[in-house]
Protein backbone atom coordinates (compact mmCIF):
# COMPACT_ATOMS: atom_id res chain seq x y z
CA UNK A 1 0.00 0.00 0.00
CA UNK A 2 1.24 3.45 -0.93
CA UNK A 3 0.02 6.71 0.59
CA UNK A 4 -2.44 8.13 -1.91
CA UNK A 5 -4.60 10.51 0.10
CA UNK A 6 -5.33 13.69 -1.86
CA UNK A 7 -4.48 15.76 1.21
CA UNK A 8 -0.83 14.70 0.85
CA UNK A 9 -0.56 15.93 -2.74
CA UNK A 10 -0.28 19.19 -4.63
CA UNK A 11 0.10 20.29 -8.25
CA UNK A 12 -2.23 17.49 -9.38
CA UNK A 13 -2.48 17.44 -13.18
CA UNK A 14 -4.68 15.07 -15.17
CA UNK A 15 -4.00 16.41 -18.68
CA UNK A 16 -0.69 14.89 -19.75
CA UNK A 17 0.44 12.66 -22.61
CA UNK A 18 0.86 9.12 -21.29
CA UNK A 19 0.83 7.38 -24.67
CA UNK A 20 4.06 9.01 -25.85
CA UNK A 21 5.81 8.04 -22.61
CA UNK A 22 4.42 4.51 -22.64
CA UNK A 23 5.68 3.93 -26.18
CA UNK A 24 9.22 4.58 -24.91
CA UNK A 25 9.06 1.50 -22.67
CA UNK A 26 10.49 -1.69 -24.14
CA UNK A 27 8.87 -4.79 -22.66
CA UNK A 28 11.05 -7.84 -23.14
CA UNK A 29 11.03 -11.61 -22.67
CA UNK A 30 14.06 -13.02 -20.89
CA UNK A 31 15.30 -15.45 -18.29
CA UNK A 32 17.39 -14.70 -15.25
CA UNK A 33 20.88 -16.19 -15.32
CA UNK A 34 20.08 -18.03 -12.08
CA UNK A 35 16.98 -19.64 -13.64
CA UNK A 36 17.74 -20.40 -17.28
CA UNK A 37 14.67 -22.62 -17.67
CA UNK A 38 12.09 -19.96 -16.85
CA UNK A 39 11.24 -17.23 -19.35
CA UNK A 40 9.40 -14.18 -18.04
CA UNK A 41 8.02 -10.90 -19.35
CA UNK A 42 9.43 -7.70 -17.92
CA UNK A 43 11.66 -4.69 -18.34
CA UNK A 44 15.32 -3.80 -18.02
CA UNK A 45 15.54 -1.37 -15.11
CA UNK A 46 18.03 1.01 -16.71
CA UNK A 47 15.73 1.44 -19.72
CA UNK A 48 12.69 2.19 -17.56
CA UNK A 49 14.61 4.73 -15.47
CA UNK A 50 14.58 7.35 -18.24
CA UNK A 51 10.78 7.05 -18.69
CA UNK A 52 9.47 6.37 -15.16
CA UNK A 53 12.40 7.10 -12.84
CA UNK A 54 10.30 6.70 -9.70
CA UNK A 55 9.78 3.02 -10.63
CA UNK A 56 13.49 2.17 -10.49
CA UNK A 57 15.75 1.77 -7.50
CA UNK A 58 19.52 1.50 -7.57
CA UNK A 59 22.10 2.70 -10.04
CA UNK A 60 22.95 1.22 -13.45
CA UNK A 61 26.05 -0.98 -13.37
CA UNK A 62 26.55 -0.52 -9.60
CA UNK A 63 28.75 -2.96 -7.72
CA UNK A 64 29.37 -3.41 -4.01
CA UNK A 65 32.73 -3.02 -2.27
CA UNK A 66 33.66 -6.58 -3.29
CA UNK A 67 32.88 -5.99 -6.96
CA UNK A 68 29.64 -8.01 -6.89
CA UNK A 69 26.61 -6.82 -8.82
CA UNK A 70 24.41 -4.41 -6.83
CA UNK A 71 21.33 -4.85 -9.01
CA UNK A 72 18.70 -2.29 -9.89
CA UNK A 73 15.09 -3.09 -9.15
CA UNK A 74 11.70 -2.09 -10.54
CA UNK A 75 8.49 -1.40 -8.67
CA UNK A 76 6.20 -2.33 -11.56
CA UNK A 77 3.18 -0.91 -9.72
CA UNK A 78 4.60 2.54 -10.53
CA UNK A 79 3.92 1.78 -14.22
CA UNK A 80 0.18 1.25 -13.65
CA UNK A 81 -0.86 4.96 -13.73
CA UNK A 82 0.95 5.36 -17.05
CA UNK A 83 -0.83 2.32 -18.48
CA UNK A 84 -4.26 3.39 -17.23
CA UNK A 85 -3.84 6.92 -18.62
CA UNK A 86 -2.74 5.48 -21.97
CA UNK A 87 -5.81 3.23 -22.10
CA UNK A 88 -7.99 6.28 -21.40
CA UNK A 89 -6.27 8.24 -24.18
CA UNK A 90 -6.68 5.37 -26.64
CA UNK A 91 -10.33 4.91 -25.67
CA UNK A 92 -10.96 8.61 -26.36
CA UNK A 93 -9.30 8.30 -29.77
CA UNK A 94 -11.37 5.21 -30.61
CA UNK A 95 -14.60 6.90 -29.53
CA UNK A 96 -13.75 9.92 -31.67
CA UNK A 97 -13.09 7.72 -34.72
CA UNK A 98 -16.29 5.72 -34.16
CA UNK A 99 -18.31 8.93 -33.97
CA UNK A 100 -17.31 9.89 -37.53
Image (cartoon, helix red, strand yellow):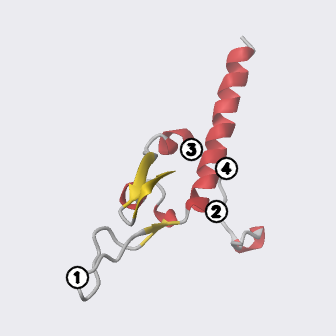
Image-based side of 15 in relation to 30, left or right: right
Residue labelled with disc 3 = 18
Query: Can you say which quadrant of the picture contains the C terminus?
Result: top right
Residue labelled with disc 2 = 11
Say which mark, if any, is on residue 14: 4
Q: Is residue 15 above or below residue 51?
A: above
Residue labelled with disc 1 = 67
Image-based side of 27 in relation to 92, left or right: left
Q: CA distance from mark 2 to mark 3?
A: 17 Å
Q: Which tag is nearer the camera, tag 3 or tag 4?
A: 3
Considering depth in this image, is 52 or 60 the residue closer to the camera? 60
| Residue located at (55% from left, 65% from top) | 75
* Label 2 Cα neighbours within 10 Å, binned few <14 / some 14-19 / many ≥20: few
From this viewpoint, is residue 17 visible? no
| Residue located at (61% from left, 40% from top) | 86
From this viewpoint, is residue 18 visible? yes
| Residue located at (67% from left, 49% from top) | 14
Q: CA distance from mark 1 to mark 3?
A: 38 Å
Considering depth in this image, is 52 or 34 the residue closer to the camera? 34
Local SS, label 1: loop
Q: Are marks 1 and 4 in contact (CB under 8 Å)?
A: no
Looking at the image, the residue that sits furthest to the top is 100
Image-based side of 9 in relation to 62, left or right: right
Q: Which tag is nearer the camera, tag 4 or tag 2?
A: 4
Q: CA distance from mark 4 to mark 2?
A: 10 Å
Local SS, label 4: loop
Q: CA distance from mark 1 to mark 2?
A: 42 Å
Q: Position of residue 96 (x, y in %)?
A: 70, 21
Local SS, label 3: helix
Q: Which tag is nearer the camera, tag 1 or tag 2?
A: 1
Considering depth in this image, is 1 or 27 the residue closer to the camera? 27
Q: Which tag is nearer the camera, tag 2 or tag 3?
A: 3
Amino acid sequence: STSSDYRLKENVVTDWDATTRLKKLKPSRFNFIADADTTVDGFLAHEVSSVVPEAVSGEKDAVDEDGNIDPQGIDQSKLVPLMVKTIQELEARIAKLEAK
